[in-house]
Amino acid sequence: MTSETKAARPRLIVTRKLPKQVEDYLAGRFDAVFNEKDEAFTPKQLKDALSDADALLPTAVDGLSKDMMEGQDLRCKIIANFGVGYNNIDVDAASGAGIAVTNTPGVLTDCTADIAVALLLMSARRTTQSEKILRAAQWEGFSPTFNLGAKVTGKTLGIIGMGRIGKAMAKRCHFGFDMPVVFYNRSKMDPDEAKKFGATQLDSVEDVLKTADFVSLHCPGGGSNRHLINAQRLSMMKPSAHLINTARGEVVDETALIAALQTGTIAGAGLDVFEEEPSVPKALTQLETVSLLPHIGSGTLETRTEMGMMAANNLVAFFEGKKPDNQVN
């Protein structure tokens, strides 16, 4: 391949390190700039990338705001987001600037649901605290009353957002742990479809919170969903209930959640996402009634590779003059 041919290829900036298979694929089709140090881009670096490249492949935590895309002549023509959610991108501003936006839906469903189940079990059975005691050599042997948790089997699961991941969570819990499922979804689901997951649709978020023993969040972030779970709604949950969040950090008011856990308003929580990642409030990390994971919901080699390849294929389709399958604007 001549240097002239290589130079003619679209210039692509990738904001984080991706699985080798994905980077090799991109390198063969684009004049690709990779993030070898895997350090998060600053807002300035993201803004500059929109002017320096024909395409940008960011992650779901790279904020691309309106002011980055307005009032300047941008070179970038497509943002291929690495993630099913794209509330990190001002899609209206991107459309106004003539930039296509794509995402990677579907491929992370199973692994994210698996982590939600893991957090549910961790929170219910207080595994984080038990492991901490064991690793600190503070375990004094079997005791009938040591660090007692809550039984999961037969308890009611509440789901907020019955999309792909919500359905996968319902399937695992209903058929795996005999859990009745109630859910809230903005759109109405056919009752026969809901029955496939052992689920019943309720009329409001509040109805789910009042009914469920475990509440699992699977709704998009941003917009009206910011702080969807606030102090008032937390107060509606059972004192024995647990909150699980693998959706987006901003869906939960962290300050209100910390207060609810400190006062015993709810029994526990399991979180994989946070409001200001990678920053996690110290008060949250010090609580013994919360299990925390560092945003690893889709964190398997298989899934992250599939996500990367989907983003890559969206880019290839776009530069071949086709509309990408996963274009959202």
Image (tube, helix red, strand yellow):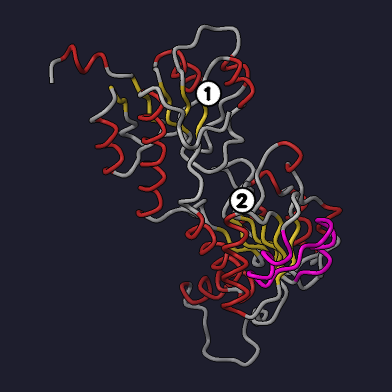
**Left or right for 106, reference 96:** left
CA separation in Å, label 1 and label 2: 23 Å
Q: Quadrant of the C terminus?
A: top right
Which type of secondary structure does the marked residue at label 1 adopt?
helix
Percent position of residue 258, x then y:
73, 55
Residue 57 appears anywhere in the view: yes
Read off the magenta span.
190-212
Answer yes or no: do the residues labelled 1 and 2 have beta carbons within 8 Å?
A: no
Q: Which residue is mark 2?
A: 247
Q: Residues within 10 Å of mark 1 (few under 14, many from 20)?
A: some
Q: Residues within 10 Å of mark 2 (few under 14, many from 20)?
A: many
Above or below: residue 146 compared with residue 271: below
Residue drawn at point x = 54 percent, y = 16 percent: 98
Residue wearing tag 1: 43
Pointer 1 or 2: first along the chain:
1
Amino acid at the residue labelled 2: Ala
Q: Is residue 198 magenta?
A: yes
